[in-house]
């Protein structure tokens, strides 16, 4: 796939565009990461590109978040209870992942048990 003339042309033109824009992109990166005489990044220029947050503020926020997390016993809460044999929940609904054919098959088995005899199979009776 991707061997047509059009895709080859597009790849070629994208490569040319990358070559053309590379110096501008490099200058922009250098400007964003330019260092002051002190050796720190210029925050006023960086704020135009990204939001700047001091590291100690983030650390304090992480400590507060970690303290707020409750200890979990590892068990998952299930909203609806499901019968393992019939796959029906308390409302008589099948799971969303189950297809119509499988649901119909399970319903047929359930009804056969209820009535006492299964669905008669088609074919020659000997």
Image (cartoon, rainbow, N blue to C red):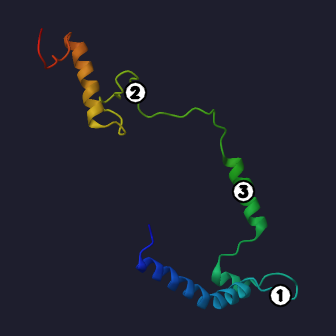
- Alpha carbon distance from label 2 to label 3: 39 Å
Task: Tell me the quadrant of the picture where the N terminus can be found.
Answer: bottom left
Evaluate if marks 2 and 3 touch, with contact meaning CB atoms under 8 Å apart.
no
Residue in the foreground of this view, choosing between 83 and 21: 21
The quarter in which the C terminus is drawn is top left
Q: In 3D space, how far apart are the residues under numbered discs 1 and 3 (Cα atoms)?
A: 30 Å
Residue matched to label 2: 82
The Cα–Cα distance between marks 2 and 1, rounded to whole angstroms, is 65 Å
Q: Which quadrant holds residue 115? A: top left
* 105 relative to 121 in the view: left or right: right
Report the disc number at residue 62. 3
State the SS at label 2. Answer: loop
Name the front one of labels 2 and 3.
Answer: 2
Q: Is residue 19 above or below residue 55?
A: below
Q: Residues within 10 Å of mark 2 (few under 14, many from 20)?
A: some
> Residue 19 at what x, y percent from top left?
61, 88
Could you tell which of marks 1 and 3 lies nearer the N-terminus? 1
């Amino acid at each position: 796939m991707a061997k047509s003339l059009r895709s080859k042309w597009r790849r070629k033109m994208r490569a040319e565009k990358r070559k053309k824009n590379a110096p501008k992109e490099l200058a922009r990166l250098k400007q964003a990461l330019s260092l002051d005489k002190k050796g720190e990044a210029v925050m006023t220029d960086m704020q135009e590109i990204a939001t700047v947050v001091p590291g100690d503020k983030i650390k304090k926020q992480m400590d507060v978040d970690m303290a707020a997390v409750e200890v979990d016993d590892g068990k998952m809460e299930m909203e609806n209870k499901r019968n393992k044999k019939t796959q029906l929940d308390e409302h008589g609904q099948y799971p969303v992942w189950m297809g119509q054919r499988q649901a119909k098959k399970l319903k047929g088995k359930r009804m056969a048990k209820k009535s006492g005899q299964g669905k008669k199979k088609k074919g020659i009776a000997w």
